Amino acid sequence: MAPVMPHQDSRARAAEAFRLRGKRRTWKQIADALGYKTTTGARQAVERYLAANPPAKADDMRRIYDESLRLVAEKMWDLYEDAVTRGDVQDAAVAARELRALQTESVKLWGLYAPTQHTVAAQVTVDQTPTAILARAEADLLAAFEARQQTAIEGEVVQ
């Protein structure tokens, strides 16, 4: 079957189909919006698009994002220092919070924010069954109820 449109337009349409799928559109909605004859055609276009555009390697993306964070932090340090020089405590605090957020993002990016596992050496032993615990609680409640009933209040009603 001969192509319906130029190759470049077909690629752009597949990229748009991928974008719409990323916005959680159904295959039917994508096919209708972009003029695919069937939902299978829209799905296959996205599959071909993904095969032709594999994702970047995680380490490469990490380095790119880290450099981006570094450049923003560099400018933020200038703003922080300027605010401190001017004596503007509020602007300095805002810049300091942003610097901290940038550092946190960088630390997370490189996996340094991962929780550490701790082992507890203490051993816990349970020597009662749930039935025994409930029986004990029931006995305590009944004893408290009886103690409360034995308390008498003397008084006189005055009208």
Image: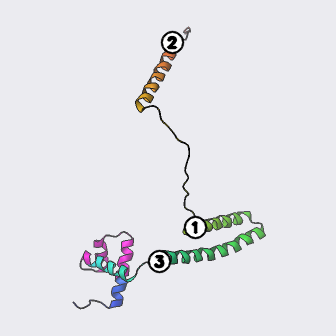
Would you say residue 122 sits in the magenta stretch? Answer: no
Which of marks 1 and 2 precedes in the sequence? 1
**Secondary structure of residue under mark 3:** loop
Quarter of the figure that contains the C terminus:
top right
Q: Give the prevailing secondary structure in the magenta stretch.
A: helix
**Secondary structure of residue under mark 1:** helix
Q: Position of residue 53 (x, y in %)?
A: 40, 82
Q: Position of residue 110 (x, y in %)?
A: 56, 69
Q: Position of residue 20 (x, y in %)?
A: 37, 74
Q: Nearer the viewer, mark 2 or mark 3?
A: 3
Residue at 31% of width from left, 70% of height from top? 26
Q: Which residue is mark 3?
A: 57
Of 72 and 119, the residue lying toward us:
119
Residue at 53% of width from left, 13% of height from top? 151
How busy is the neighbourhood of tag 2: few (under 14 within 10 Å), some, or many (20 plus)?
few
Residue at 26% of width from left, 90% of height from top? 3
Quarter of the figure that contains the N terminus:
bottom left
Q: Which residue is mark 1?
A: 105
* Magenta residues, start to end: 14-40
Left or right of residue 158: residue 41: left
Q: Which residue is mark 2?
A: 150
Q: Position of residue 122 (x, y in %)?
A: 55, 43
Of 50 and 4, the residue lying toward us:
50
**Secondary structure of residue under mark 2:** helix
Would you say residue 23 sits in the magenta stretch? Answer: yes
The amino acid marked with disc number 3 is Lys
Vertical order, 144 against 118 (above or below): above
Q: Nearer the viewer, mark 1 or mark 3?
A: 3
Of 113 and 159, the residue lying toward us:
113
* Mark 2 to mark 3 CA distance (whole Å): 78 Å
* Mark 1 to mark 3 CA distance (whole Å): 19 Å
The amino acid marked with disc number 2 is Gln
